[in-house]
Amino acid sequence: MFQAIARAFRTPDLRNKLAFTLGMIAIFRLGSFIPSPNVDYTNVQQCLAQSNSTSGLYELVNLFSGGALLQLSIFALGIMPYITASIITQLLRVVIPRFETLHKEGPQGQAKLTQYTRYLTIALGLLQATTLIAVARQGALFGADCTLPILVNTDPLAITLMVITMTAGTGLIMWIGELITERGVGNGMSLLIFTSIASTFPASLLQILQTRTIEIFVIVMAVGFVVVGLVVLVEQSQRRIPVQYAKRMVGRKAYGGQSTYIPVKVNTAGVIPVIFASSMLYLPALLAQFNQPDANGQVAPWVTWISTYLTQSDNPLYMAIYLALIVGFTYFYVAITLNPEEISDNMKKYGGFIPGIRAGKPTTEYLEYVISRITAPGAIYLGLIALIPLVAFTAIGTNQNFPFGGTSILIIVGVGLETVKQINAQMQQRNYEGLLK
């Protein structure tokens, strides 16, 4: 393995791409530790030391930002606004015909959709920065764990400067990700998420080692290896639907007659359903958070119910709703991204057919049946993987950023495998063995 890495750095073109990628990642991580204007960095660090956990969407955003969110740094929002904007753009293809038309127009249409995604990213950055600063201003960012003042100045001008700074940080992260995609290796946005999550692993493992016994630490490591192996197995698993293309004569040349397949991954949706589910569960908690007690110090019954059942991740009802949302969103997202009717029409257009299945509606129905059956175990697998941190929090009392479970392992393994494949392909183009045997 080390010899393969050395060969990669000895290839001039690939070495430049790797060096550029590492440089951009270093800038990204540096910005995660630079505090925004008007933030009391000392009090923030004390609150971080006193706080045991975060909940809801802030837990996910803090994970994707590499811990920058709770430090209120210039990169506090991380890559989350871009992820949300990309998801919204994909969903709008279903309800806005113009977006679907652009998607089918090829590179020009994709460039236009990318431009819309950038605009939406900045808009979401403004919204999320305003919400984050409002929560920090009320002293609710760390909950009851810390009551120290986080903001030095709460004047409108100072708050506006913080919002602009965080939004600009989001735009800079988006630009860095696109630069890595163009001049570096792999998908830049995915690599930035990978970097953010991987940066939290040492601290999480050290906290478990310091606060728990060595036996629990060994158990956590063993669970980690099992989970990683399971994720690698499932992420690489796919159902290959055979497709045969009929021969066509154009002049004196014959085209087609090839056999290929349609790969349907077990986990087609990736980590998107987990993000959807976390966002949906956080909305009631956010509404309850801004509901102030009355003159007698009493809160509305619905606020009490939400605080009891929908903010505590160790609550069985919370886990059940979380699992149900993940399964439901998995089916919903797969239905959007894998359109059996569109696949069937494209096959028919180019003379392709599934052996034993008639072209047209029978092919569409067969694809719907196969995709539905493949999605079922994928949705259950995704839900169980996402529940691992919550179960660990209940069983051994670790913080909710349990390193070996949920979105962290899914992204680490998925992005890692994809990046290695891309580097391997570039090395093989230059007549090298590559990273993979």
Image (tube, rainbow, N blue to C red):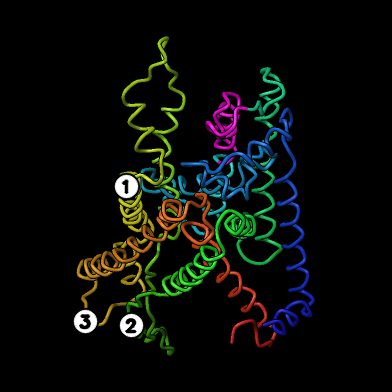
Of label 1 and label 2, which has the lower sequence position?
2
Residue 378 % position (x, y): 35, 65
The answer, for residue 168, to whether it is visible in the render is: no
Q: Return the residue at label 2.
A: 244
Q: Residues within 10 Å of mark 1 (few under 14, many from 20)?
A: some
The answer, for residue 292, to whether it is visible in the render is: yes
Q: Please state, as top left, top right, bottom left or bottom right, where the C terminus lies in the image.
A: bottom right
Rendered position, 267 above or below 310 = below
Q: Which of the numbered marks, if any, corresponds to residue 316?
A: 1
Say which amino acid is labelled 3.
Answer: Gly
Q: Which residues are magenta?
A: 121-147
Name the image quarter holding residue 156: top right
**Considering the numbered disc 1 on the image, is that residue within a helix, a strand or a loop?**
helix
Q: Return the residue at label 3.
A: 356
Measure the alpha-carbon separation of dots 1 and 2: 49 Å
Residue 45 % position (x, y): 69, 39
